[in-house]
Amino acid sequence: MRALVHRVLPSSVLLRHVLAVLAALVVVVLVLETTSQFRNSQFATMSYYAIAAVGLTVLTGLNGQISLGHGALMAVGAYTTALLLADGAVPFPLAMLAATAVTALVGVVVGAAAARLHGPYLAGATLALAVGVPGLAIYFDGLLGGEQGLRVSSPRPPDWLDDALYFLTANDLTGAKYLAYLGWGTLLLVLLLLANLMAGRYGRVWRAVRDDEVAAELAGLRLGRLRVLAFVVSAACAGLAGSVLAMVVRLAAPSGFTIVLSLSLLTAVVVGGLGSLTGALLGSALLVFLPPAVTNVGTSAGLTGVQAAQLAPFVYGVVLVVVMLVAPGGVMGLVRSWRRRGLRQGGSR
Amino acid sequence: MQQFLNVTLGGLAQGAIYAAFALALVLIWRATRIINFAQGAMAMFTTYLALVLIESGQSYWTGFAVALAGGLVLGALVERVVMRPVEGGPELNAVIVTLGLFVALQALAAILFGATFQSFPAPFGLRGFTVGGTTIAFTPFSVFVIGSVVVVMLGLVALFRFTDLGLRMRASAFSQEVARLLGVRVGRMLTLGWAFAAVVGSLAGLLIAGGNLVHPAYMDAVIVYGFVAAVLGGLESPAGAVAGGLIIGLALSYVSGYLGSELVTLAALAILVAVLLVRPHGLFSRVAERRV
Amino acid sequence: MAEAELEVRALTARYGAVTALDTVSLRARPGEITAVLGANGAGKTTLLRAVSGLVRGSDGSVLLGGRELAGAPAERIARAGVAHVPEGRGVITELTVEENLRLGELLGTTRRKRRRVHRLDGVYEMFPALGQRRRREANSLSGGERQMLVIGRALLSEPEVLLLDEPSLGLAPRVVAQIFTLIRELVDREGLTVLLVEQNARSALSIADTGFVLNLGRVVANDSAAALAADAELRHSYLGF
């Protein structure tokens, strides 16, 4: 089976990743074209969670650093986007790039401090970041809009794309669908970049640092720099995610970037399995599709709407605890151990 | 001058509360090498218990006592049920479990008690004392805050210094293996340690709430301040935590009074980063080096 | 009085894939010092840790006066009367000298309410150096003083069995001689059962009554101390003197 896979797929890792992304693109088009507008907007939401989560999983899973501040980093990306798109002079792809760059720069500063911390110290410092950053929006309310936040003018689909898609699918391109395409296109690009990064030299050295710092140090790796780099990559993803969020939600406001957002992202990567891109995708799907489900359960059990809305974070918290106690490897960890067991029982080594 | 005095007095009262909260973090850190990020949420939860009782017509003091007792039980339960399996394991796992508890408790409180702001009573007056014709920002309630924190601290000192139980708890915290070889039931000591810490945390929650508005996230910032205070004191030392709490209380009060209350948490972050980078073992530690 | 025999039957302990103890059986009688000898990595320390319950999941049997201890947690075994003085001494350096001793005394009180043999004052009399530093942190003690502290602490716990792991480690010869003499006197006076793990085989055999030699987790020799010390081949291959 393995041999067959190897014969059919190209041997270059890069090429294999490109093929996988193209295949995923086809699936995305099929799914978005065949589902309702409500589902489309759910997929758009999932795309920005996933962009941030894959970035976080690189940091936490691969490099062993925890961050509770990714919600704050998303806020940086979102506010940058909102400011740039405000008067319509800046095209949105440029705003997305700028949001990524600005957040990456913030990531250099945060990462430089974070590189010298570990475990609970890093958790505490990034927690402070998550709790503190929304305060900036209120302090500078002239520029950043205070509690109300900044409205964001989302990009409209260009006519040529509308025409092209109509030609292909006989469907009109709605705003929600366009944003979903935008989000997923960005997500697939990020996945392609990160998959190559992880398969390459940096992925290997990050894992080496995580598994044995002393050995890595003895091997001549510069731990500090590697940690900062991991943080910057991760922060750039969070900034890009914040940019997509701003365009999808059409708003950048402090209430959107509470500590619960940071902890939700952590839930996504822990549940999926730390260090796994696929796991981060699964976890992001959970963040989007679980809340409506449990909210429904809650309202049919007699809770008010406000109460039922809190069931989702409650479930996140319980899931975090249970996963750590029962299956610290997350979903992908379980999948891997099942596969191993299956192979052993099948007798084919 | 008047403002400086008021800001200082306010900072001292707040600092006493942060000191109590930091002390609770240090107690748990010393015993189990875990930072309990759920401590704020636990304190918030027990404070709501008090609020429910008070609103149902019970006295403030009944609510106060029940909240502290609730903290004792909650702390013991948390240690025994969810922390025990991750103690001594990878430090990331323990951090994640406490964060999970944090989110779950906060959401549960919103479901049970509502997500809106509710006002919490204070047992003593909130009007400042009048000194020489001017009213200062030091109230009878501030006296109660500082007094109760001092009482709790003296109680803890007495427990750890002068009782057999305290000696056994300290032995368990410093060296689990040797303590077990000396017949100390270490598991029980850790459970007790978490329980006592949760009582101190609950006290901090009640004192922050007094005369203020509470909502499920009202302790979020306090966990940050308490953590910064504990790190400032070196995380290992109860006395350091108390000093750290007072310093943070004053520093943040000045930031809030002169720059703006929105910047308080970021100021705490700045202090934290500065301390960790310059004196990672805390301001008062004798230890030469520590990995942070 | 201490009158309990310690018997180990077919004790086996593993660290992952490595078998550190392989069906080890031995017997230590009251009023005797039983030496456990062997090279580094022979399994001596693991043996003591398995007896006192620090190594869990071992197979086999550990009987104290006929009572099964195997599988019980370390704190219960300590309360049953087994005092383990671990390698590296087991001083809690953050506590004061007196607090360290008090921990032993607390255990002794729970073990024997009335007929206590040892008292704090007695330990200070036995080791005057400790009395002078009772309020100091144990951190400030020298190696020999630490050894005195842990032996004193073990005695205060009123044990039936004393497990000593490398008490001579890192100490000057004169101090080692002093401590070994003291152990011999205690055993003769109080009928303690002592299991003494040593790399320093010559000194250990000079005070022991019987000895067991371990190699790669198995018992390879068992005889009176005098006979072991006289066996040239054994000395050459396992004991290094």
Image (cartoon, helix red, strand yellow):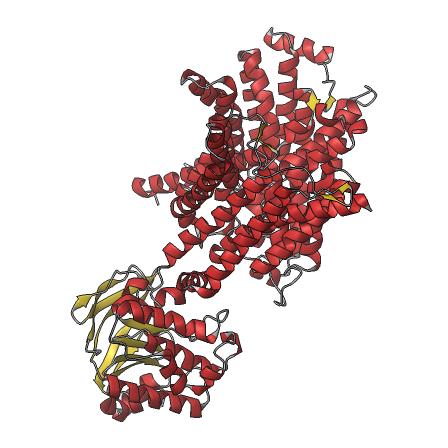
Left or right: C75 as drawn, with respect to A205: left
Q: Is residue B262 left or right of residue B99?
A: right
Front residue (pair B256, A280)? B256
Residue A302 lies, in percent from the top left, at 42, 17
Q: Relative to C2, is B214 above or below?
A: above
Q: Quadrant of residue B253?
A: top right
Q: Position of residue C7 (x, y in %)?
A: 20, 73
What is the number of callouts on the image?
0
Write the residue at 79% across / 43% down: B3
Name the quarter where the C terminus of chain B is drawn: bottom right
Q: Is residue B147 visible?
A: yes
Residue lying furthest front: B132
Residue B284: x and y in percent read 65, 63
Above or below: residue A180 compared with residue A98: above
When the figure is inspected, residue A271 is found, relative to residue B114, above or below; the finding is below
The answer to whether residue A347 is visible is: no
Closest to the observer: C162 or C61? C162
